[in-house]
């Protein structure tokens, strides 16, 4: 504290106040100790919450693809259930549960309940076999179980539809020849032929989706040319007639291609129809599965840790690179990853230059005053507008006004089917660009104002114009700060869902927005998005129990994706910093 | 206004009465060829007047030092030469300056072109956030020069001129910001001379440097003398006496005495100058 000279004579009362003030001066508060605890505590709580969230997502997300053992239980009531344990919890059963047990085990159940203070364990088994049982999951409490086993040859089948199937192989039909016998023998036969059947199926998919799609595209293009010619020169003009003739020719040729493709598809289908697998479920029912429907099948109880790890990796890869199936609750999320990354990158490409230019005007050209302050406040407030409002704006302005204009000008032939006049990649990116604009402008302005004025003066003194100074000195020097803005915008944009629902994110997009047909980037297409995917899985799914682990896994993936994008940007920023900042005097 | 009583003379009297007075300009200056002529130059920052009718001519190929206590308008005068004061909104000027006969403050004067004819080095080294090479050739870059050979030649000759070539020739592509303070300042000098300026302005070029770096810059000024006409602001009396050919003493926005450095330091015409030089005030 300051050492003020004592001038007045110090009487007793004064001395007392002085002493008190001295004590205050060295009190805990001024010492700073409580502040350390307060600030440190705030940080600790904040990081605890973030880490807790991450831990939750990791805890639930990571084991999703791990193949656990299959259990088969026999209840006292005589039911047999087989499946994978997906949830284990303790619960307090109703007294009627105990009453319903056969007399012989009631006493044991009561004492079990007493030991557990009225609670006992129950497990949710993923029993699958939906077409036979009508449910995917079944709860079974420990009280009900008469016997439990892990049968060696209980097989888990992941298939294209109807969810999982659990059963023991009883017969296999290879190329029309049916064999019964030991599960082990049958399984060897299955594994021998499964790949070729799947290869045929994939070929068929490709024919159906890509090649027939290409034929359709050709016919559609010819039809559009006719329509365009009619619109441009009238229905009876020579051009329209020529286009119609051409379209006729294209259609005839396409018809032929179409028939030959159909024939190929039919052949593949017939071939595959000669391969089936017969399984017996735990309760003795039989089911015949087409081999081509089987995505993956294995007997979990026979697998060692390495083999389980193999399944884990295989499933994870499928998740990352494959398309979703079963209403998105199974299969992969590749289209969603692709859509998220592409949309975020387009957004960054749109928002960064725009935001930087705006910040440049605000900081470098505008004369400081009430108007500039008002604009700045407005920009900051933009960050507080609910994101769904941006979605509504995007839908109303971009899709229905701009998009409709674009359609009328450039895609008139396709009307009334909208091309740009609906939600799409470009509108979603633009909407998010608008949303993240303040996130870019604010740090950029800060970075611009932190460029030392001595650098600007040096540049002016060399005879540089204002723009040369900005372009060659100010912007490079502010680049790390601008990158910070971009990082924030990427994180914000990649995680945003609400506005996307209105402007182009869909549950299932049949085509990726980037493909091999001109013009390669199809900015008008709807797209899948991981954030929307999470929402869809969590709240719109038919089979919500099966979708739940996927929610966590997809969340984990989205977080990983955002972190990856951020790390990339941070790495670039660090490089720029090394280059442009160095040891400043 | 109240001045230290030890100082007396007509200058302080005139200043305190806010009357104009003629600066004491030594006769030997008249025989020099002048690169820069300043005539009756006034400057206001808003309402406060920073320069009072300064008339001063800078000899060609010589080093001229501006000395005087803080706030006497040395830097303001220097920054008026390349019109850096234009960047400040509230500045208003009157009077004339001519660079090799061309009026600096003529209404149609292109400030950008003018600044390209004048090199300036600032108090604090201000290398740009780019490589050493790009820093040196910056004036050429903004002029649109693209010939790699020309750029490389200018870079080498400027760095040699600034006595930095041997230290940095192997790392021209490194960031200039990683040089030491003294090196950075010499880099700024190299940048200032790379455009072959008609006059070089140094605004206290050593005030942010340690003694060794300062000595090197002074040596450098010695070497540049003859090839360049230098107008230098300094706070350091020894530096002025060592490095300059002519010295102008300024006080409270007025030019007080201007003459060959030896005369100013050894036999000044005015008592005020002597008092300042000998450290009796300032």
Image (cartoon, coloured by chain):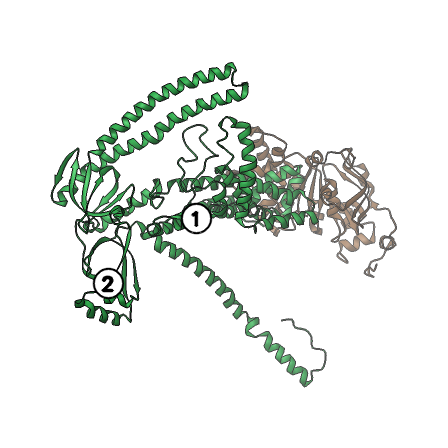
Chain colours: A green, B brown
Determine which residue is flagged by label 1.
A563
Choose between B33 and A532: the one closer to the eye.
A532
Q: Is residue A394 left or right of residue B206?
A: left
For the residues beneath circles 2 and 1, the answer to whether they share a chain is: yes
Q: Chain of mark 1?
A: A
Q: Is residue A279 left or right of residue A503?
A: left
Is A395 situated above or below B17? above
Q: Position of residue A311 (x, y in %)?
A: 26, 46
**Mark nearer the N terminus (2 vs 1):** 2
The mark closer to the camera, 2 or 1, is 2
Q: Which residue does the image show at 27% across and 68% down from the upper left?
A: A95
Determine which residue is flagged by label 2.
A142
The quarter in which the N terminus of chain A is drawn is bottom right
Q: Which residue does the image show at 82% across and 58% down from the upper left?
A: B7
Residue B245 seen: no
Is A512 situated above or below A32? above
Q: The residue tagged with tag 1: helix, strand or loop?
A: helix
Q: Is residue B176 left or right of residue A340?
A: right
Residue furthest to the top: A238
Q: Position of residue B267 (x, y in %)?
A: 80, 50
Q: Position of residue B180 (x, y in %)?
A: 56, 48
Choose between B81 and B37: the one closer to the eye.
B81
Q: Position of residue A504 (x, y in %)?
A: 47, 40
């Amino acid at each position: 504290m300051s050492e003020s000279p004592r001038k007045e004579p110090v009487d007793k009362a004064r001395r007392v106040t002085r002493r008190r003030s001295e004590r205050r001066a060295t009190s805990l508060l001024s010492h700073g100790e409580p502040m350390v605890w307060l600030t440190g505590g705030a940080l600790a709580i904040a990081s605890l919450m973030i880490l807790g969230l991450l831990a939750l997502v990791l805890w639930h997300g990571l084991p999703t693809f791990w193949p656990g053992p299959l259990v088969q239980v026999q209840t006292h009531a005589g039911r047999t259930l087989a499946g994978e344990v997906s949830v284990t919890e303790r619960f307090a059963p109703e007294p009627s549960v105990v009453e319903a047990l056969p007399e012989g085990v009631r006493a044991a159940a009561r004492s079990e309940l007493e030991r557990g203070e009225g609670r006992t364990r129950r497990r949710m088994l993923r029993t699958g076999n939906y077409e036979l049982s009508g449910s995917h999951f079944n709860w079974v409490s420990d009280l009900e179980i008469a016997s439990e086993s892990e049968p060696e040859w209980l097989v888990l089948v992941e298939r294209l539809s109807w969810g999982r199937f659990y059963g023991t192989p009883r017969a296999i039909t290879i190329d029309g020849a049916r064999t019964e016998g030991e599960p082990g023998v049958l399984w060897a036969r299955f594994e021998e032929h499964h790949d070729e059947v799947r290869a045929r199926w994939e070929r068929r998919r490709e024919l159906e989706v890509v090649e027939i799609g290409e034929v359709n595209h050709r016919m559609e293009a010819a039809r559009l040319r006719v329509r365009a010619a009619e619109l441009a020169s009238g229905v009876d003009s020579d051009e329209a007639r020529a286009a119609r003739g051409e379209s006729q020719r294209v259609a005839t040729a396409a018809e032929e291609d179409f028939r030959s493709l159909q024939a190929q598809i039919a052949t593949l289908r017939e071939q595959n129809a000669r391969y089936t697998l017969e399984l017996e479920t735990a309760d003795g029912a039989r089911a015949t599965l087409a081999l081509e429907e089987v995505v993956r099948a294995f007997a979990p109880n026979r697998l060692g840790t390495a083999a389980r790890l193999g399944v884990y990796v295989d499933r994870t890869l499928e998740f990352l690179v494959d398309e979703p199936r079963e209403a998105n609750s199974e299969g992969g999320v590749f289209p969603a990853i692709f859509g998220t990354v592409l949309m975020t990158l387009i957004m960054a490409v749109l928002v960064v230059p725009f935001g930087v230019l705006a910040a440049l005007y605000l900081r470098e050209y505008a004369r400081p005053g009430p108007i500039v302050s008002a604009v700045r406040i407005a920009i900051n407030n933009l960050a507080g507008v609910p994101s769904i409002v941006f979605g509504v704006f995007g839908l109303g302005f971009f899709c229905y006004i701009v998009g409709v204009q674009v359609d009328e000008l450039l895609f008139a032939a396709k009307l009334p089917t909208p091309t740009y006049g609906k939600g799409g990649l470009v509108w979603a990116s633009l909407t998010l660009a608008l949303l993240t604009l303040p996130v870019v402008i604010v740090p950029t302005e800060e970075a611009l104002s932190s460029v030392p004025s001595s650098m600007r003066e040096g540049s002016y003194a060399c005879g540089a114009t204002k723009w040369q100074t900005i372009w060659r000195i100010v912007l490079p020097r502010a680049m790390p700060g601008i990158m910070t803005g971009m990082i924030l915008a990427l994180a914000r944009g990649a995680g945003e869902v609400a506005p996307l629902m209105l402007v182009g994110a869909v549950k299932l997009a049949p085509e990726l927005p980037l493909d091999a047909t001109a013009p390669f980037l199809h900015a008008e297409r709807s797209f899948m998005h991981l954030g929307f995917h999470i929402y869809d899985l969590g709240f719109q799914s038919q089979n919500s129990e099966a979708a739940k682990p996927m929610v966590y896994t997809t969340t984990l993936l989205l977080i990983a994706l955002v972190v990856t994008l951020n790390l990339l940007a941070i790495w670039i920023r660090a490089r720029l910093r090394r280059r442009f900042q160095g040891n400043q005097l | 206004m109240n001045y230290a009583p030890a100082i007396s003379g007509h200058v302080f009297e005139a200043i305190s009465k806010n009357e104009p007075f003629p600066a004491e300009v030594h006769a030997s200056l008249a025989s020099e060829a002048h690169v820069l002529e300043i005539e009756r130059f006034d400057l206001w920052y808003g309402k406060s007047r920073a320069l009072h009718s300064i008339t001063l001519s800078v000899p060609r190929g010589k080093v001229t030092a501006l000395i005087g206590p803080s706030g006497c308008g040395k830097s303001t005068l220097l920054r008026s030469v390349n019109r850096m004061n234009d960047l400040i909104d509230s500045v208003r000027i009157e009077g004339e300056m001519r660079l090799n006969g061309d009026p600096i403050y003529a209404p149609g004067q292109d400030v950008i072109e003018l600044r390209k004819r004048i090199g300036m080095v600032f108090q604090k080294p201000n290398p740009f956030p780019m490589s050493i090479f790009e820093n040196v050739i910056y004036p050429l870059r903004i002029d649109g020069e693209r010939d790699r050979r020309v750029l490389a030649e200018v870079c080498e000759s400027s760095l040699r001129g600034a006595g930095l070539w041997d230290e940095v020739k192997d790392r021209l592509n490194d960031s200039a910001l990683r040089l030491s303070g003294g090196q950075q300042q010499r880099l700024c000098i190299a940048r200032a001379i790379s455009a072959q300026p008609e006059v070089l302005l140094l605004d206290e070029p050593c005030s942010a440097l340690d003694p060794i770096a300062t000595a090197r810059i002074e040596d450098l000024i010695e070497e540049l003398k003859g090839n360049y006409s230098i107008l230098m602001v300094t706070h350091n009396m020894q530096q002025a006496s060592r490095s300059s050919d002519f010295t102008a003493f300024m006080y409270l926005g007025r030019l007080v005495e201007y003459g060959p450095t030896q005369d100013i330091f050894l036999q000044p015409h005015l008592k005020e100058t002597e008092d300042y030089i000998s450290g009796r005030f300032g």
